[in-house]
Each structure stands twice: as structure tokens, then as C-alpha cells.
Image: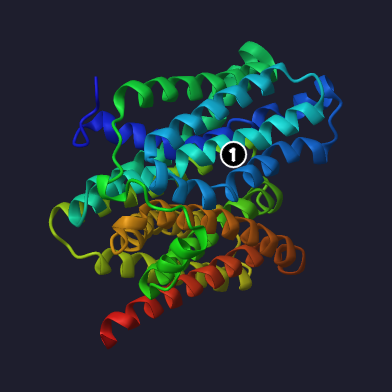
Amino acid sequence: MRLSPQSIAFTVLLGALAALPPLSIDMGLPALPLLGTALGATASQQTLTLSLFLIGFAGPQLLLGPLSDRIGRRPVLLGGLTLYLLAGVACTMARSIDALLTARIVQGVGAAGATTLALAIVRDQFHGPQARIKISTITMVFSVAPIIAPTLGSIMVGIGGWQGLYGLLALCGATLLVIVYFGLEETRPAALAGMRLDLAGRYGVVLRHRRCVGYVLTTALNFGGLFAFVAGSPLVLMGDLRMSMTEFSVLFAVTSLGILAGSWFNGWLAARDVDTQSPLGWGLWMSLGAAVIASLMLAAGLLALVSLVPFILVTSFCRGLVSPNAAHAVLEPVPAHAGVASALIGCSQTTMGAVSGAVIALLYPALGPVGMTLAMAMFAAGALAAWRWAEAEVSVV
């Protein structure tokens, strides 16, 4: 039975595809210490199970996105999910840390084949306010993954050890593979059938579109600001503020709820024909304001959970406002290159997350907690500048 693009099940499926990377990373956190005992993995090798997954995930998007424009969304989705499933089984059966790390790279590639196309499929089926609503809803589903992933990981570790955790990821891949095979029709416009792959030419079309480039930078830099909190929060919250692991996990879940709330509010606004620029502008300005005020408070020595958390929640709420609107602005002008545009969004965000983590590694040792909020402010200012640059073309034309 094919899923109707208007159905809740269709939206949940796309959200689940987009959620594969955070699910695959966050679920693995509880298993890291066990790898040392079971496979003799060092602390750095344990961390590599996360970073190598991201390496496998980031680059292939740039090929798989345009490939889906060439041969269709379904073949790329089915291939990616099959690879993800097989890599999950290989992770479960790994008898050495090297085998596990290799499987995790392949699993990242498989996740890229699935996740990259969620936005492209939305562009195939919707435009205007309906596309904004659909992307906002997908973001809501996507936001649930970081909330439930650590708990699911802990449960599976308790039931089946670290193998049980990777077994569950393989099961997730198998479930999505079956649903896509039986429930998802090809969405790529028929007019695109037979077009040449021509990566340089097709990326050139999108990259010459100033508005697309500006909004790719906007959503990537905005993500970098949020990821600065993700990278710095263990140091600040569990280090400086002495939070327990349980308290930290709860706060992390609340942060994800902020993204969910922002996405819901954005969809609510889109359903009432509020233009894209209003919530996008609110989100970018509020993100910058929250990060600057938090930095000033920390610089003044006012480090306390009650004063810091509200600003973090504002930042996560704003991510829910910015992300769907910026993604929509990238995809809307280039319907013939939706796969390319979607790949640029995904790869740029992954890359900016890595840059953000590196910035935290540089600033925190020198500045302490204020280094985290200062990094957030820097990325927020960059996102705001990118947005204004993207829209400058509109005012000139």
C-alpha cells in the first residue's frame, strides 16, 4: 500500500529517514565504555565509532543527492537503507575494534543515502507554504531522536550488551527499508528522467544561485551555533556546574524539545500564511541576542544553571524556526536540482558541526564557559550575515 504524500505516515517516514544520523550517534553513547572491555578499544577508538560514522555520512551526500536527480529517489533510498542494514549487522557481529570502525564508516554512507533525500522528496511533492509546513513537521519528528536515543541505547545495552544496541540500529534500517519498498512511490519529476549526472555542471547551477548559497550558509552557520552548545555542554554543565549524567541527559532532552516547539510554531505560522522571512528573522536575531547576553553574564561571573538554561532553550527554539524556512528557501528556486540542493544542506551542516566542535576545543581551554557562548554568538552572527546577504539580491532585482 502506497503512502499518500498528504498522510501523517508519509511525514513520519521522512522524519525517520532524516533522524537516522542522530539516532545512530546518540544511541551509541551508552555502549562506548563497553567497547574497551569487549574489544580492547582505547578511549580514542571508542570515540572514533562516532566520528567515523560522521565521516562516512558527510561526503557521499554530494554524490547521492545528484544521483537521485538522475536515477530517481527510490533506488538511492533503497540502496542506502540496504547498506545501512548490512553495516548494522556487521557492527553486531564485529569481533575487533577495527572491524567495528570499518562497519561504522559504511553505516554512515548508508545513512547518507537515506537522509539526504528527505528534503528532496518534500520539494518534489510540495511548494510554497505547504512545503514549509511539511519541512517543519519533519523537523519535529527528527527532533525526537536525540530525546529518546540515549534512553533506547541504555535499554538495549542492558538487554543485549553493545551488540544489542547495534542490532536495534540494524532493525531500524530493515524496518525503513521495508516501508520505503512497499509504501513510497517514486517522487522525482518525470521531466528529470534521463538527465546527465554531470556533477560539476549541476552543482554549478545551484552554486551560481546567490539565494541558494546564502541560505545554505544560513542554515549551516545556525546549526554550528547549536552544535557549539552540544560540544561545549558536557564541559560546562558536567564539568563547571557539576551536573550528574542523569541531570545532563534530561537537560539535553529538554533542549531537543525546544527545537520541536520551534518547528511546531513555524508550521503553525506557515498554515496561517505568515511569510518565510518573519520567523526566519526572529529566529536569527533571537539566537544572536541570547548568545550575546549569555556571554556577558558568564563574563561577569554569573555562572548558574538557572541563568544559563533559558538562553540555551531560546537558541534551540530558534533552530526550529530557522532550519525549515532556510531549507525551504534553498530548495524552492531549483526544483530540477532538489537532490543537489538537499545534499548541499546536509553536507554543509555536517561540516559546520565539525568546525564548531573545533572552535569549542580552541576557545574553552582559554576562556572557560564563556568560550561556549561566545562561539554560539559568532556562528549566530555569521548566520544572520548570510541571511542578509542572500536577501540583498532580492532587494536589488
Specify few, some or many for label 1: CA neighbours under 10 Å numbering under 14, 14-19, or 20 or more. many
SS for callout 1: helix
Q: Nearer the viewer, residue 110 or 152?
A: 110
58, above or below 72, in the image: below
Quadrant where the image shows the C terminus = bottom left
Residue 370 located left or right of residue 393: right
The picture places residue 47, in percent across and down from the top left corner, at: 74, 40
* Residue depicted at 62% across the width and 72% down the height: 299
The picture places residue 31, in percent across and down from the top left corner, at: 69, 27
Residue at the far top in the pictured view: 159
Circle count = 1
Which residue in the structure is indicated by mark 1? 109
352, above or below 179, in the image: below
150, above or below 44, in the image: above
The picture places residue 316, in percent across and down from the top left corner, at: 44, 54
* Residue depicted at 71% across the width and 49% down the height: 239
Q: Amino acid at mark 1?
A: Val
* Residue depicted at 66% across the width and 29% down the height: 30
Residue at the far left in the pictured view: 272
The reply to whether residue 371 is in sight is yes
